[in-house]
Image: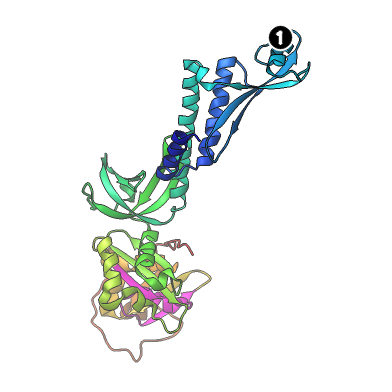
Amino acid sequence: MNNELLEALNVLEKEKDISKETMLEAIENSLLTACKNHFGKADNIKVVMNHETCDYKVIAEKTVVETVEDDVMEISLAKAKMMDSKYELGDIVQIEVKSKEFGRIATMNAKNVILQKIREEERKVLFNQYYGKEKDIVTGVVQRYIGKNVSVNLGKVDAILNENEMVKGEVFMPTERIRVYILEVRDTTKGPRILVSRTHPELVKRLFESEVTEVKEGIVEIKSIAREAGSRTKIAVWSNDPDVDPVGACVGLNGARVNAIVEELRGEKIDIINWDENPAILIEHALSPAKVVAVLADPDEKTAKVVVPDYQLSLAIGKEGQNARLAARLTGFKIDIKSETQAKEIEGFLDYDVYEEEEEYEEGYDDYDYEEDYEEAPVEE
């Protein structure tokens, strides 16, 4: 038994996750390469290896001839008879080749074949390991800043957090542990190149999956997400179990679950609303915390007209239009928001009068017509 080789292969398999069978195949190829460098050809060479004990032999098959013209491929009848008297012309004689007799160049080439195979397999193992985590979140350790980008160690490989995938104003310290979303894993000659993000909406979804058991088990579904990283996120949730409150499950006891996510996102506000198949009800929920008087939604045109109390107009629009903007992204509808006073002044704004029994609210808010169209943030099912 070749104990040294067996032990070395076991260490490789344990530390680098490179299978013993793969390395034995690489050794066979390296021996054939060494033979080709030593003899000039290896067409008649074969390697016999016991994969259990790692014992191996290199065999050269030579044809018995009267006169030898190629000593690599042929053997004289006289020499063959000395080995075994039964050999005749045209027979094939198997002769063991001593690998220790190979020259320095042949030995170095064989070594390079094995090292190259180890590097290739190591890159392949790392790529497969992290490719399986693509579109998922992982915990990494901040290494250093590379210009305006950040190098994040994920365990066996470093990832790149580009400046445009970082939350504005977020600063990291070396050795700090952060959660990141794996955007893409590329296979390169220098190993896998991993791009990660702190701004992607799916980061929030994966954080809820890790914190909320009901989401992880599929009882509660996150139907849609709209996010402005570092500032605010709105998510719409739905429960497949009538006994489970989806919003309550995501918030947790005394807000424990959502607060853990907010802390990971460094104070980013998160609004959790109930999903509804009725677009009017969904839009009403999406505009929370503002109260809504009426919603007229056109599912075909993906547009909606919304009326809010006068004193709620600023809240519905949000700072710099953020609340309305996120609601539009969350629902996929183009939203036109008016106060009650403004809506009454626009003939036919709604097809029916919903204001007769409403209270009179404070006037004086500026008009805001939310015309810009936003696309719904894609969410993996």
Could you tell me if residue 283 is visible in this image?
yes
Identify the amino acid type marked 1.
Val
Magenta highlight on residue 173: no
Q: As drawn, is 17 to the left or to the right of 60? A: left
Q: As drawn, is 323 to the left or to the right of 194? A: left
Give whichever of 308, 178 is nearer the camera: 178
Give whichever of 155, 29 is nearer the camera: 29
Q: Position of residue 176 (x, y in %)?
A: 23, 51
Q: Please tell me whether mark 1 sits on a helix, a strand or a loop.
A: loop
Give whichever of 266, 45 is nearer the camera: 45
Q: As drawn, is 165 to the left or to the right of 280? A: left
Label 1, on which residue? 68
Q: Position of residue 128 (x, y in %)?
A: 47, 47
Q: Quadrant of residue 188?
A: top left
Magenta highlight on residue 271: yes
Q: Which residues are magenta?
A: 270-298
Q: Position of residue 291 (x, y in %)?
A: 32, 80
User: For the point 35% across and 80% down, which residue is it?
Assistant: 292
Image height of 119 relative to 212, above or below:
above
The total of numbered circles placed on residues is 1
User: For the point 71% across and 9% down, which residue is it?
Assistant: 68
User: For the point 46% across and 34% down, which residue is it?
Assistant: 5
User: For the point 37% across and 73% down, which residue is it?
Assistant: 286
